[in-house]
Amino acid sequence: MTMLSVLIAITILILAFSVRIIQQYETGVVFQLGKYSRTLQPGFNLIIPIVECAKVIDMRITTHDIPKQQVITKDNVPVSINGVVYFKVMDAQTAVIKVQSYLYAVSQYAQAALRDVIGCMTLDELLSERQKIGDEIENVIQKEAENWGLQVTAIKLQDVDMPEDLKRIMSRQAAAEREKRATITKAEGDKLAAFNLAEAAKTMALSPGAMQLRTLQTIDGLGPSASNTVVLAVPIDIIEAVKGFTAKITEKKS
């Protein structure tokens, strides 16, 4: 009875070490006496204890931070920049056999690629073309990652930190640019207003009663408030007519 119990215990122990449950998003790489044997698919799998061992690989997209790097741009501006690399394992066997730690390898290669790509760009290009920079870094990493059984899906740049004095200069430059646009807009408005006034003056010159109508509109716009003092300017032609009429009367009397 004791021997039977021992055999049952040993059998249960062997089964426990033999069973491998692989999740849907995983792949198992089996080595038999140190040599690649087969790949385990998701679900229930059995391996030979002691003789075989399995390394489970996550096949989902992995997100890994690119630590902040000190980089000198093409126009000799020191900047600190970090990012994120997104990749996934496409060939579990190659990822396990060809590289000791694919996660560490991708991280280091991404840092080197980030420095190389940004070092060939100016500060203005860095600030305005982040997507282009990310695509170039992705292409550089992907060429090497294919040899490791990996696929880089995206590279995203996060923070770009510049020296404080450069930030102040850029702030003044942006303010000057906004003031320049405001001055141009105001000048264009003044030009248009002057053109309209000139056209209005021509219209009034061609219409003798236009000035009087404009004067009446202005008076009407003042409102009925008692605090408003209105001074009426009599047109010069009316004054001349009155003077002529007065002179004729004087001549007749004399």
Image (cartoon, grey):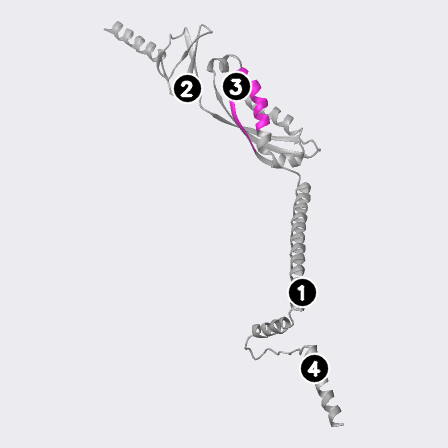
Circle nearer the N terminus (1, 4): 1
> Secondary structure beneath disc 3?
helix
In the picture provided, is 19 more to the left or to the right than 228?
left
Disc 1 from disc 4: Cα separation: 24 Å
Which dot marks residue 102?
3
Q: Position of residue 62 (x, y in %)?
A: 48, 25
Disc 1 from disc 3: Cα separation: 81 Å
Q: Which residues are magenta?
A: 135-157
Q: Residue type at mark 2?
A: Glu
Circle nearer the N terminus (4, 2): 2
Q: Position of residue 27 (x, y in %)?
A: 42, 17
Judging by the rendered image, the residue that carries numbered circle 2 is: 26
> Secondary structure beneath disc 1?
helix
Verify CB contact (< 8 Å) between mark 1 and mark 2: no
Circle nearer the N terminus (3, 4): 3
Q: Position of residue 74 (x, y in %)?
A: 69, 31
Q: Position of residue 154 (x, y in %)?
A: 52, 27
Please indicate, yes or no, whether residue 102 appears anywhere in the rendered image. Answer: yes
Q: Residue type at mark 4?
A: Ala
Judging by the rendered image, the residue that carries numbered circle 4 is: 241
Q: Can you tell which quarter of the image residue 128 is in?
A: top right
Verify CB contact (< 8 Å) between mark 3 and mark 4: no
* Pointer 4 local density, CA inside 10 Å: few below 14, some 14–19, many at least 20: few
